[in-house]
Image (tube, rainbow, N blue to C red):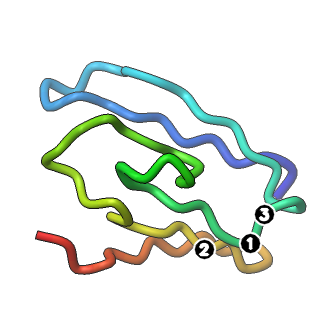
Amino acid sequence: MDKLFIQLIDKNDNPVELFEFSPLQLKAIKIGSSKTAKISFDDPALSKMHAIIEIKKSQVVVIDMGSI
């Protein structure tokens, strides 16, 4: 896997933002409202650490951190 692309969409299925990552440089991509998250949102409805995307060889695993 040379590159990993993550496309964010809004609630109406419209593309919002495209992120590009090099999996060789990352083992995990953190998603949340925290400024330290690789994909960060300024949204009070989103927890600081909402989900983690783990990259394991040729697999991509999304882990919900159980936020409500």
Residue found 32% across the figure and 35% down from its top: 42
Tell me the kind of residue under disc 3. Answer: Leu
x and y, in percent, of residue 52 in the image: 48, 69
Quadrant assignment, res 65: bottom left
Q: Nearer the viewer, residue 41 or 25?
A: 41
CA gap, disc 2 and disc 3? 9 Å
Residue at image x 22%, y 52%? Answer: 46
In the picture, measured across the screen, residue 45 lies left or right of residue 2, that is left
Q: How far apart are the two marked residues, 2 and 1, measured between alpha carbons? A: 6 Å
Q: From this viewpoint, which residue is outermost toward the front? A: 35
**Disc 1 packing (10 Å; few <14; some 14–19; many ≥20):** few
Mark 3 surroundings: few (<14), some (14-19) or many (≥20) residues within 10 A: few
Q: Name the residue under label 2.
A: 54
Q: Which mark is residue 26?
A: 3
Q: Horizontally, is 58 left or right of 62 in the view?
A: right
Using the image, tell me which numbered label, if any, was put on residue 57: none
Question: Please, is residue 12 above or below residue 64 in the view?
Answer: above
**Secondary structure beneath label 3:** loop
